[in-house]
Amino acid sequence: MDLTIPEALLLLALDDERGTAILDDGTLGTAMAAAAIAQLLVDGRLRVAGEGEPGAKPGRLVPAAGATDPRLEPIVERIVGRTPTPALQIVAGFGGPGSPSGKVRRQLLDDFAELGVLARQQDRFLGLVWRERWERGDRRELEDALRARAREVLAGADDDEPVDAALGILHGADALPKAFPDLPEDELRARGEELAAGSWASAEVRRSLASLQSAMTAVMVTTVIMPAATSS
């Protein structure tokens, strides 16, 4: 099984029965943005500048020479020179299809459909598409292997970079109990904290991911808690 962090996150965030995401669009957009930036950090395509680096302000994202998924490359130029929180907000946008994270999501869904991992279903009314669903395709072995590995990781296994990272991001989105409703919630949250800390990554990447995790928490407060408070 060879998946990127955004690919693993997206498959884990889909409800197989409903064919839709377990997260609302805004939260999924933020989670996908975090997954994309995390992949760029892990690949060495971006890094967070440290104190005293010539030509770079500390805490800012700077480009590096690592190779990454071509589908993520357009994001790099948009967030270079930013700190993690603004970078995450830029990539997440408003969670819609036109945002950077929305475009990545669409590309991944289309590629999964082409491979037969997912099957696109469109609900129509009066000839118009009012909902699009993504059900399991004929090639189910990839998602089955991912979900089996995710359960192993949640049970304590480690050293599985994309799965560990995807689960850590889902924890940051408070979505692990939704993704694995049959598992004890307290244990899921405790394991999610471990995975969010990035213990699977190198020390340098771990420091960068810690900044990203803090940024994700801040953005989630803005996109989830603030609208709820406004509507009440």
Image (tube, rainbow, N blue to C red):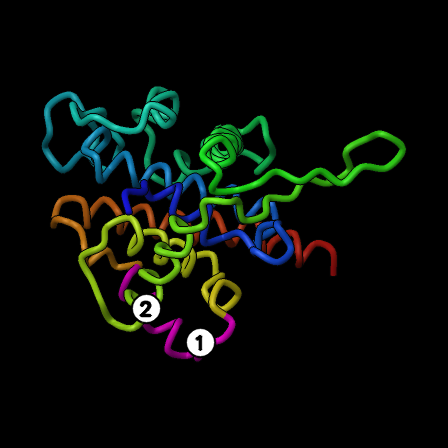
Three-letter residue code for mark 2: Leu
Tell me the residue that label 1 is attached to: 183
Q: Relative to the observer, which residue lies in front, 112 or 13?
A: 112
Q: Residue at x 38, y 25 (%)?
A: 71
Q: For the C terminus, which image quadrant? A: bottom right
- For mark 1, give the secondary structure: loop
Residue 212, magenta (yes or no): no
Image location (x, y in percent) of residue 227: 65, 52
Question: Which quadrant holds residue 171?
Answer: bottom left
| Crowd tier of the residue under label 1, counting other residues whose Cα lies within 10 Å: few below 14, some 14–19, many 20 or above | some
Q: Tell me if residue 221 comes above or below residue 186 in the rendering.
A: above
Write down the region rendered in magenta. Answer: 181-195
Image location (x, y in percent) of residue 177: 49, 69
Q: Does the magenta stretch mainly form a helix, a strand or a loop?
A: helix
Label 2, label 1: how far apart the Cα atoms are: 9 Å
**Labels 2 & 1 near each other (Cβ < 8 A):** yes
Three-letter residue code for mark 1: Leu
Q: Residue at x 32, y 42 (%)?
A: 3
Q: Tell me if residue 32 comes above or below residue 17 in the rendering.
A: above
- For mark 2, give the secondary structure: helix
Residue farthest to the front, as pictured: 138
Tell me the residue that label 2 is attached to: 154
